[in-house]
Amino acid sequence: METRPRKVDVQPYSRSWADSFQEEKQLLAAVFGESAPIHHIGSTSIPGMSAKPIIDILAEADNAGIFDEAAPKLQGWGYTAKGENGIPGRRYFVRFTEAGERLVHLHGYPKGHPEIGRHLLFRDYLRKHPEEADLYSRTKLVAARKYPYDIESYIKEKDPVVKLLDEKALAWHLQNEGKEQDLI
């Protein structure tokens, strides 16, 4: 659990983030089994992108109750349940290191929730468009320098670029619908 102001620490891409995701995925698969597809999302899932070194994971399940039932086991592994945390239908968990640093953000959604497609499309768009990933990286670095201990202002500062990239990702998806391309 965090006991001091949260530092906004945006770092250059690290290949270790993919390995960390795979380790966490195995741990989560032991809890959810085959019933919950588990995806690496967020900036740490995009090769070459600068990011806060926190692994964002999206898990899907038939219903949100699966995540509620798993909460005690997840808590035993260092996760803290945060409920919906501002997004109706989501179950949000944060895993902390022993030193109290954020390690993982787990976003649990019931299958069909609109945030699932948005997250996966955003990730896939940035993976296929490195120039857009670079724009987002630069935006995050500027925001982190401007607001090193103010996560809310950091998020607000980068929000216009996130919205622009969300729009571009959707347009890209619609333009490529039906083509032989793995979009989501």
Image: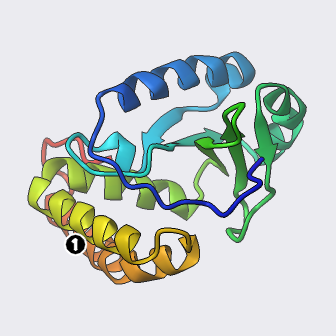
**Picture coordinates of residue 35 (x, y %)?**
66, 27
Q: Nearer the viewer, residue 7 or 161?
A: 7
Badge 1: residue crowd in 10 Å (few <14, some 14–19, many ≥20)? some
The answer to whether 116 is drawn above or below residue 19 in the figure is: below
Left of 154 or right of it: where is 132?
left
Count of labels in the image: 1
- Residue at 53 percent across and 61 percent down: it is 115
Left of 112 or right of it: where is 80?
right
The answer to whether 180 is drawn above or below residue 138 in the figure is: above
Q: Amino acid at mark 1?
A: Lys
Left of 93 or right of it: where is 123?
left
Residue 3, picture quadrant: bottom right
**Picture coordinates of residue 178 (x, y %)?**
19, 52
Q: How is the image coloured?
A: rainbow
- Residue at 76 percent across and 37 percent down: it is 79
**Picture coordinates of residue 39 (x, y %)?**
47, 37
Circle 1 sits in a helix, a strand or a loop, which is it? helix
Left of 55 or right of it: where is 31?
right
Question: Which residue appears farthest toward the front when viewing the image?
Answer: 4
- Residue at 42 percent across and 51 percent down: it is 42
- Residue at 84 percent across and 33 percent down: it is 75
Q: Nearer the viewer, residue 148 or 103?
A: 148
Q: Nearer the viewer, residue 115 or 111?
A: 115
Residue bearing the label numbered 1: 168
**Picture coordinates of residue 180 (x, y %)?**
13, 41
